[in-house]
Amino acid sequence: MNSLEPTSPARPAGESHRQNGTNQAAVLTIIVTSYLMLVVDISIVLTGLPNIQAELGFSHAELSWVQNAYTLTFGGFLLLGARAGDILGRQRMFIAGLTLFAAASMAIGLAPSPTWLLLGRAIQGVGAAILAPSTLALLSIHFAQGHERTRALALYAAAAGVGASLGLILGGLVAQVISWRVGFFINLPIGIALILGAMRYLAETPLKSGQLDLAGAVSSTLGMSVLVFGIVRSAELGWGDSVTTAALVAGLTLLTFFVIHESRASEPILPLHLFANRERSAAYAARMLFLGGMVGFWFFTTQFLQGVLMYKPLHAGLAFLPTTIPNFVAAMLVPRLTRKFGNARLLAVGLVFAIVGMAWIAQVSEHSPYITGIALPMILIGMGQGFALAPLTVAALTDVASEDAGAASGLVNVAHQLGGSLGLSVLVVVFATGGSVAMDASGQLAHHIANTFTASAVMLSISLVLVLSFIVRPRTQLCPQ
């Protein structure tokens, strides 16, 4: 799933705040719960997508914006959010991000139209971009390096695995029993409780001098958003449509401006020299391709389960357990397996698992049984994601200077979010242009979804080629067995 990937930023100035056990428990609860809320909110919408589409009148192409509006602003403003926390204080930005996220969640729950919902999702993404960088930074100053911090980070990381399953099941439950809107309403009381807890228990970090690169953040986010808009629009109106062409040209122009601006900015949000290392650059590109393929799997599988197999939303959420449970177990095994086989080899193995699983599930049709057509390949896909994400993160932080640690770890998360958005937009085009077959509506839907799984397998295969060429092979040459 397109969950947040926990990557440690540079430690903020100041020593860890040593507190009594009660206060430390409160701090850990606040931080982990806020992170869990972000993870759950990514997955909770998935099992409600068919209901959202039916109630608000989204087309199949427009439906992708329910996910993209969130991930584009999240990824686009993530580096700016991290920089704002450094300058303005982590506790202050933690509370600001929570406030924006909770208020936007309430607005989404009240949405009377697609435009309202998408605007709320975009604002929610900005709130997440402000909140997410502060969670790890605050954790690092409240828990001393060593056993305390290791335990806290383990619980923080475990929230990702728990949150993925919880979001799918909770989203399916409320969509089936009450309304998909409840999945967003619940963020308001949780957010208020976390804000009150943060004001009482979280220490503020020292303020720093510096500048916020607003031009970089806005141009990169607008550029990616307009580019994705052009790609998605082409799925419905074709590449020859004048608005589609204008959007693609505008998006590429804004991204070109962003690169030029970052090369000249005194305090850029994205230091371009991070791309000088070929292994790191390959890891960023491989991550974008990997997330592009995986987000498509989550997005279209829920539509297959509910639109073809006719599962209720709750049953669709439970049907993802063959992916989420192996994903969690594999992620917990990564430290031990990395010591035994090495980071690069484990990354390649994880990608192979994911490719085989995706190629298998790409054979689905309206007559495919759940166990052999969906559940068994889901196990491989879950194991692949669990084995691959942490090693991809390690590869992306290879030989990073200490002064660039924060920007480099932030860039990992940017690649994570924007790769999912860009990949999903491409898969929407594949879905729309997959050709028609002599079947009923259910069969047609299954055929188009199978095509997107094939395209996802291709994305994952290209990611594997990059990993083998620029990460595994160089590492093998440096460390011959």
Image (cartoon, rainbow, N blue to C red):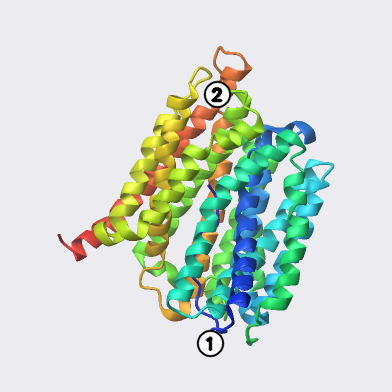
Look at the image and tell me whether residue 189 can be seen: yes
* Residue 300 visible in the snapshot: no
Q: Secondary structure at mark 2?
A: helix
Q: Which mark is residue 272?
A: none
Question: Which residue is found at the position 61% from the left and 32% from the top?
Answer: 315
In the displayed structure image, the side of residue 313 where residue 380 appears, left or right: left
Specify whether 183 is left or right of 370: right
**Spatial distance from mark 1 to mark 2, Cα to Cα?**
56 Å
Q: With 8 as the anchor, is 469 left or right in this view?
A: left
Tell me the crowding category of disc 1: few under 14, some 14 to 19, or many 20 or more residues within 10 angstroms, Cα based: some
Which residue corresponds to mark 1?
Answer: 15
Q: Name which quarter of the figure residue 283 lies in.
A: bottom left
Residue in the foreground of this view, choosing between 283 and 223: 283
Q: Nearer the viewer, residue 3 or 31?
A: 31
If the image is split into quadrants, where does the C terminus sit?
Answer: bottom left
Q: Residue 110 at what x, y percent from top left? A: 83, 47
Q: Is residue 11 found left or right of 33 in the rendered image?
A: left
Tell me residue 373's x, y (percent): 45, 26
Amino acid marked by disc 1: Glu
- Lower sequence index among marks 1 and 2: 1
Residue shown at 43% from the left, 44% from the top: 326
Residue 318 lies, in percent from the top left, at 57, 36
Circle 2 packing at 10 Å, graded few (<14), some (14-19), many (20+), is many
Q: Residue at x 48, y 20 (%)?
A: 368
Q: State the residue position of label 2.
A: 446
Query: Up-down: is 339 above or below 432?
Result: below
> Which amino acid type is shown beneath numbered disc 2?
Ala
Vertical position of residue 197 compared to residue 40: above or below: below
